Image (tube, rainbow, N blue to C red):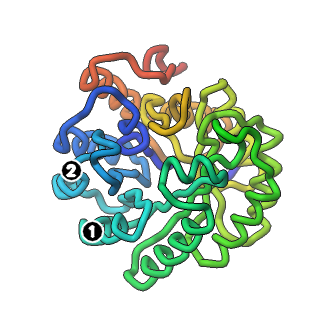
Amino acid sequence: MSAITVCDVGPRDGLQNDSTMLEPALRAELVDRLAATGVPRIEVASFVNEARVPQMAGAEDVVGTLHRRPGVVYCGLALNERGYERLLAAGLDEVHFSFAASETFNQRNQGSTVAGSLATAGSVVGRARTNGIRSTVTIGTAFGCPFEGIVDPGHVAELAAQVVAAGPDEILLADTIGVATPRQVAALVTTVARLGSPVGAHLHNTRNTGYANALAAIGAGATLLDASVGGLGGCPFAPRATGNIATEDLVYLLDGEGVETRVDLDALIGVSEWLEQALGHPLEGQLYRAGRFP
C-alpha cells in the first residue's frame, strides 16, 4: 500500500473532553513531543469560546510556546470567522473548519444551521487561500447523530459536493460518535473521493470499529487519517462519544499492513506513557500498555 498522512488531534480533540485541564505550556510540550516522533501533521489548539470548552483556554499561548520543527504542519480548529482570525494571527499553517451534517448536532455544537456553517466554511476556505495557509473542512456526524440517529449518506454527499466547490485542500468525513462500520465508511469515502478533492477520515472507536474503519477508508481512497495520541478524545456535546482511534495503535496497524507513515512508533508509545503521567489516569489506547511486537 502507498503512504498515508496521519494527523494527531490529541492536543485538541483529545484533551477537550478530558476532565484534567492541562496548562498551555504542557499542551505545547505534548505537541513538541508528538512532532519529534515524525507525525507530519498535528492539530495543536482550538480557537473557540473558552467558556464552553475550558480545556482549550489559552490557544495563543500554546502556539506561542511551540518549538516548531521543519516539515511538520501545525493546525488549529476554528468554528467561525472570529476563530479563524485568531488562528491566522497566531501563525498556524492550516485551518480546520468543522460542522455537522445533522441540524440538531450542529445547532448544539456551533449555534448555527447547517446551511449557515456551509457558508462560513466557504468564507474561511477562501480567506485561507488568500492568506496562503492550508484548509481542511470536516463534515461531522457523517454516519450517525446522537440526536437524529442514522444520517443519510446521500445528504452527506451533497454537503461534500458543496464543500469541495469551495476549494479546500482536503475534506474529512467524521464518525463523531463512533457508529460506522467498514462497509459504510468505504461507500461514503468512495462517493466523496469522486468529487476530486483529497479525502480523509476522522474516526472514533466508541463501538470498537474504528481501526477496521481506518483500513476500509484507505482501501476506498482516503489519504489522511486523524487519530489521537493514547486514544484520548470525544466531544463535549455528544453524549457517550468516547475517544478517537489511538495514534500509536493506528501506526502499529498501518506498519503491519505495509502502509508507510514515517512515524517512530517507539517514540510515539513514549509520548502516551508521558501523557498518562501528565493527566494522572490511564489512556484508552492499548499499544502503549501492551507493547509493540516483536
Residue 61 drawn at (x, y percent): 17, 53
Which of the two residues, 69 or 164, is positioned nearer the viewer here? 164
Label placed on residue 46? none
Q: In this rendering, does residue 118 appear at all?
A: yes
Above or below: residue 267 compared with residue 168: above
Could you tell me which residue is drawn at 33 percent across and 48 percent down? 35
Could you say which quadrant of the image residue 178 lies in? top right
Rendering coords of residue 31 (x, y %): 30, 45
What amino acid type is highlighted by mark number 1?
Gly
Residue 79 picture quarter: bottom left
Of 81 and 60, nearer the camera is 81
- Check disc 1 and report the residue beneath it: 91
* Above/below status of 105 relative to 287: below
Tell me the residue that label 2 is attached to: 58
Q: Is residue 183 left or right of residue 88?
A: right
The answer, for residue 4, to whether it is visible in the render is: no
